[in-house]
Image (tube, grey):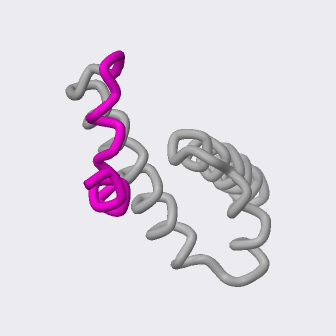
Amino acid sequence: MLFYLTTLNLKNLLDSESDPIIVVIVDTWNYSNFTCKNYILNGFDNILYDVYSSIKSIKTLCKALDWKYKARDVGIKKIHSW
């Protein structure tokens, strides 16, 4: 039974010290973070994929992309305002 629950990623629910609600929340967050990050990375060119694939969380990835492209937009606006 332990093997079966491990393959379903439910073994953590058997630990007496683990709160099942917290385990489910953390697992859900990890799955959502992984899925969302990889949907974004899937749209990148290979060069950008290599740069951003090492980032672990979607929040950090979004901040990095926001910072890069906001800085680029500011530069473009400065050039066009002359």
Residue 23: quadrant of the picture: top left
The magenta segment:
1-18
* Residue 7 versus residue 9 in the image, above or below: below
Residue placed at 38% from the left, 53% from the top? 31
Q: Is residue 6 left or right of residue 21?
A: right
40 in relation to 1, above or below? below
Q: Position of residue 64 (x, y in %)?
A: 67, 46
Res 81 visible: no
Q: Is residue 26 magenta?
A: no
| Image quarter of residue 54 | bottom right
Q: Please state, as top left, top right, bottom left or bottom right, where the C terminus lies in the image.
A: bottom right
- The residue lying toward the viewer, choosing from 28 and 75, is 28
- Closest to the observer, 27 or 8: 8
- What residue is rendered at 50% in x and 67% in y? 38
Q: Is residue 78 visible?
A: yes
Left or right: residue 56 versus residue 18 is right
The residue positioned 46% from the left and 57% from the top of the image is 34
Residue 62 position, x and y percent, is 55, 47
Coordinates of residue 47 in the picture (x, y in percent): 78, 78
Q: Residue furthest bottom?
A: 46
Give 30 or 38, whichever is nearer the viewer: 30
What residue is shown at x 44% (from left), y 50% (from top)? 33
- Image: 24 above or below 36: above
Residue 14 in the figure: left or right of residue 81: left
Image coords of residue 7 (percent x, y):
35, 62
Residue most toward the top?
17
